[in-house]
Image (cartoon, rainbow, N blue to C red):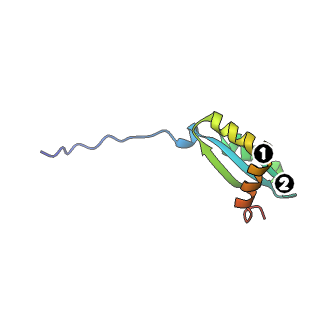
Amino acid sequence: MIDSAKPRQFKPYPAHKFMYYVYVLKDQPNGEIYIGYSQDLERRIQEHKRKKPELVYYEAYKSEKDARMREMRLKQHGQTKRRLKERLQNSLI
């Protein structure tokens, strides 16, 4: 016998509400690069709006600790930042 009842609808929570983002912004006027992390990426971009930011890259993490560690590595370790810039060379032009 086939159950003709409608299947239960599963409504997952939006993934972005439980993610932490490490991001790279490029300021339009001077081309400066800014690296940061946030749980609300859209809000952070809006907060940078007076500098006319362009989002050129982001990574999403489930763990805040992982996101903070990645941000710290990008900010403190020249080789890590250099490799990221190499990967994004056409996006940073």
- Per the image, the residue denoted by label 1 is 77
Q: Which quadrant is home to the N terminus? A: top left
Task: Check whether the beta carbons of the residues at disc 1 and disc 2 lie within 8 A of each other.
Answer: no
* Classed neighbour count for the residue bearing mark 1: other residues with Cα under 10 Å, few (<14), some (14–19), many (≥20): few
Q: Residue furthest top?
A: 65
* Amino acid type at image mark 1: His
Task: Identify which residue is drawn at 68% across, 54% down.
Answer: 57
Q: Residue at x 72, y 42 (%)?
A: 71
For the question of whether residue 54 can be seen, the reply is no
Q: Position of residue 27 (x, y in %)?
A: 82, 54
Rendered residue at 45%/40% (across/down): 12
**Residue located farthest toward the left when viewing the structure as drawn:** 1
- Front-most of 9 and 61? 61
The residue wearing badge 2 is 32
Q: Is 47 on the left or on the right of 57, as rendered?
A: right
Question: Is residue 30 visible to the viewer in this orientation of the structure?
Answer: yes
The CA span between labels 1 and 2 is 18 Å
* Amino acid residing under circle 2: Glu
Image quadrant holding the C terminus, namely: bottom right
Of residue 24 and residue 80, the one placed in the foreground of this image is: 80
> Can you tell which quarter of the image residue 38 is in?
top right
For mark 1, give the secondary structure.
Answer: loop
Nearest-to-viewer mark from 1 and 2: 1
Q: In which quadrant of the rendered view does residue 28 lie?
A: bottom right
| Number of numbered discs | 2
Name the secondary structure under disc 2.
loop
Please identify the quarter of the rendering in which residue 22 is found: top right
Q: Looking at the image, tell me whether mark 1 or mark 2 is earlier in sequence order.
A: 2
Q: Position of residue 14 (x, y in %)?
A: 52, 42
10 relative to 85, above or below = above
- Who's the residue at 73% across and 55% down the image? 83
